[in-house]
Image (spheres, rainbow, N blue to C red):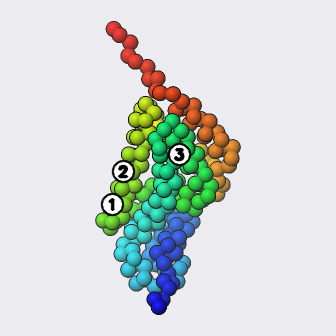
Amino acid sequence: MPQPVKHSADVMLDAVRALVLSGGPAAASARAVCLATGASSGSVYHRFPRRDDLVAAAWLRAQDRFLRVYLEALAPADAQAGVRAAVAVLTWCRSHPEDAALLMRHALRDLLRGDTSPALAQQAQAHHRALGDALAEVARATGHPLADVVLAVVDLPYAVARRAMRDDGTPGEDDVEAVRRAVALLLSGPSDSPQASPP
């Protein structure tokens, strides 16, 4: 029978996440991961040949976990999709505080010193496309400008989540209900953008 993997990729990425959250991006070195997990340097470098691959993989793993929930909330792209998605931001942050803290505190580009492996770069691009396509579909389905949809279902819930998560807190039920009401108001009915007055 095959031997169980003693130091799995997830164990290593959990260590990267903890190192970044406690000491900032510079703390997440391959050596630090080895010390935190007991894994050999060869085991770490076999899975993640570059330091930037380590931090990118940890960040993209968190984003992937979030997007599974968020993109599901955005489909189907109906009038309630924006409300579902905005609420999902807060409830996911509450359920996954460490992954949420990694995403909220650090943009991927801020964690990197150079280039990542092509596979990780492609994963980041795929995430970006999937999110953009889903938001654009909600804009088309509701008749709202894309900028309004992004404000309602990205910027607003992210701002509330960041505020709630300061000092290691998590969004509460009052935060969830406030976001639910605000997004429903922002996206109620088709857009009524003022038209230019005739000369």
Question: Dot 3 lies on which element?
Answer: helix
Mark 3, Cα crowd under 10 Å, few <14 / some 14-19 / many 20+, is: many
Label 3 to label 1: alpha-carbon separation: 25 Å
Q: Residue at x 59, y 54 (%)?
A: 93
Q: Secondary structure at mark 1?
A: helix
Residue 157 lies left or right of residue 191; in this view the side is right
Q: What type is the residue that disc 1 sits on?
A: Gln
Image mark for residue 122? 1
Query: Closer to the N terminus: mark 2 or mark 3?
Result: 3
Q: Which residue is mark 3?
A: 85
Is residue 59 visible in the rendered image? The answer is no
* x 58%, y 62%: residue: 98
What amino acid does circle 2 point to?
Answer: Arg
Distance from the alpha carbon under mark 1 to that under mark 2? 10 Å
Left or right of 134 on screen, residue 79 = right
x and y percentages locating residue 197 in the rendered image: 38, 12
> Which residue is rendered at x = 59% and y = 60% of the image?
96
Residue situated in front as seen by the camera: 84 or 151: 84
- Which secondary structure, mark 2? helix
- As measured in the structure, the alpha-carbon distance from the residue carrying label 2 to the one carrying label 3 is 17 Å
Amino acid at the residue labelled 3: Ala
